[in-house]
Amino acid sequence: MYLLGIDLGTSSIKVAVVDVATQKKVLTVQYPEEETAIKSLQPGWAEQSPNDWWQNVQQTILKLNASGLFDPKEIKSIGIAYQMHGLVVVDQNQQVLRDSIIWCDSRAVELGNGAFEAIGAEKSLKHLLNSPGNFTASKLAWVKANEPDIYKQIDKVMLPGDFIAMKLTGKITTSISALSEGIFWDFENHEISKDVLNHYGIDEQLIPTIKPLFSAHGHLKTDIASLLGLTAGIPVAYKSGDQPNNALSLNVLKPGEVAATAGTSGVIYGVSDGLTYDKQSRVNTFAHVTYSAAEKHTGVLLCINGTGSMYRWAKHNFAPKATYAELNNLAAEAPVGSNGLKVLPFGNGAERMLNNKYTGAQLLGIDLNTHNQSTIFRAVQEGIAFAFRYGLDIMRENGMEPKVIRAGMANLFLSEVFAQTFVDVTGIPVELYENDGSVGAALGAGIGAGIFERAEDAFNKHEVIKTLKPENSGLYEPIYQDWKEILEKELAK
C-alpha cells in the first residue's frame, strides 16, 4: 500500500510515493528540472500561473509512475503541501481568472497596514494573531480595488494547494489552518473573521467549505485518474501550507517542538499551545496541522524571503555552470567570516521580520584583491545563517526557547558550511532527517485517510540521520554582531 505526496513549491513540484509499511519514500521526483520563474511585472510584485502548476504536477506524477518501482494503482490516498499565502481566484466554472499573487509579493502591504489600523492593533493581534499585512486577504482586497472586472467574476478564493486539490477532485474546500494563513480566521470567536471581511468588503460566499485538515477534501475524478494512471475515487485527504507540513514531516506536532527549513525561503517554525503573537507582527502565528477547538496548537513562524533565492541568485551570477554541491565545496574552502565579506540576503520582497521593510540584497566590503568565488559563496551562506539568528532572537522575545531544532537533509542543509554555521550562530543543536515536504504530504494523506490511527503513528519509524552541535559559537558571535550592526543601520535609513 502506498501514499502519494505532492509538494507545490515556488521553484518546482516535488512528488513522493511512500510505502505505508516502512513509512519511507520509495521515490521522490521533481519537475521541471529548471527552477520555475517568478513573474515580476513591477518591483515588489511576484506572480505564477496556477495552470502551469497543474501542468507541472501532472508531468511530475507521470515521471514518478514511469520509474516502475511501484504499482500506481496501489496508491490509496493523496496529500498536498503548498507554498503559503498565495491567492488563486476562479469563476463558477473553476476557471482561473488571473495569475496567482504568491507569498513574496509585496503589493498589498499598505492595504494590510490600513486594515490593522482600522480594526485596531490590539483586536487584530488578539483575534487574528497577526496584522493582516501582506497576506491572502489583503491580496484579495488589492484585486478588488485594482481589478474590479476580475473581482466581480470570482466564485471562490483559494490557497495554491486548494487549487491543485480542485483540479484532482473537482471540489473546492479549505481548512482552519489555511484560513489562518490567509488571515481570514478569528481565533477568539473560532469563526471566519467578520472584522477582516467587513473592512475589505469581501463576501463570505467567496470562502470555500471548511473541512478538517486531515479529512477527505474530495475524491480523484475518473478522467484525471485515467490520465495519471491512478485509481479513481481515492481521497485527497490532506492539505497544508508548506511550513506546517514541513513541521509534520519532521514529527513536530507538540508544543515546544521546533522545525526549520532553508529552501526558496527560510523558516523556523515552533509549535505552541497558546494564542501567542508578536506585537510588531514580525513573526506570525497560524493554526498548526494539529489545531482544534479543544487543543489550540498554533505554529509560530519566522519567515525569511531571501534564503535559497539569494543562493540561486549568487549561483546564476557568479558560477552559473556549477552544481549546488560544487558551490558548497567552494564555500568550504573559505575561512569562517569569509575574510570580512558580508551579505544581507533580503532581496526577495518585503521582509516581515524587518517590519515589512525592503532593504534589497547586499554584498558589503568587497576587496578586489582578497575575495573570490569561495568567499562569496561562504559569505552568502553565512549571511543567510545570520538572518536566521536575527529572526530566532525575535522568537525568543516571544517566549520560544528551542532546545533542539529539527530539519530535513535538503536544500541549504545539504551544505556542511551552512548547517554548521546555523548551529554555531544560533547556539542550538540541529537534528537532520531524511524526510522532505513531499514525504510529509504523503504521510499526512495516510493520517487523513485513517490509514494511520493517530498522527504520531505515521512517524514511529522516524530516525535521525545526523546531529550537529555548536563548535564555533564564540568565533561567530562578534562576526554576527558586526553583521547585525550593518543591518540595523540599513533599517534606520
Image (spheres, helix red, strand yellow):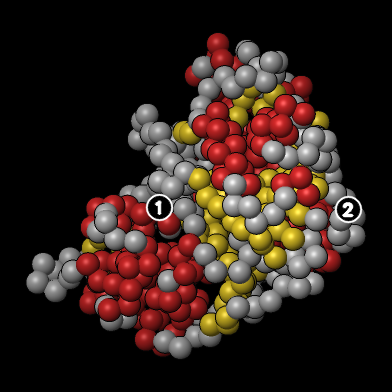
* Residue 322 visible to the viewer: yes
- Judging by the rendered image, the residue that carries numbered circle 2 is 450
Q: Position of residue 278 (x, y in %)?
A: 62, 56
Q: Position of residue 335 (x, y in %)?
A: 28, 81
Amino acid at pointer 2: Gly
Amino acid at pointer 1: Ser
Judge by depth and name the residue closer to the eye, 23 or 425: 23
462 above or below 30? below
Judge by depth and name the residue closer to the eye, 484 or 378: 378
Q: Position of residue 183 (x, y in %)?
A: 66, 40
User: For the point 67% across and 20% down, which residue is it?
Assistant: 94
Query: Is label 1 or label 2 in front?
Result: 2
Q: Position of residue 270 (x, y in %)?
A: 66, 64
Q: Quadrant of residue 253?
A: bottom right
User: Which of the two discs, 1 and 2, labels the residue nearer the N terminus?
Assistant: 1
Judge by depth and name the residue closer to the eye, 51 or 262: 51
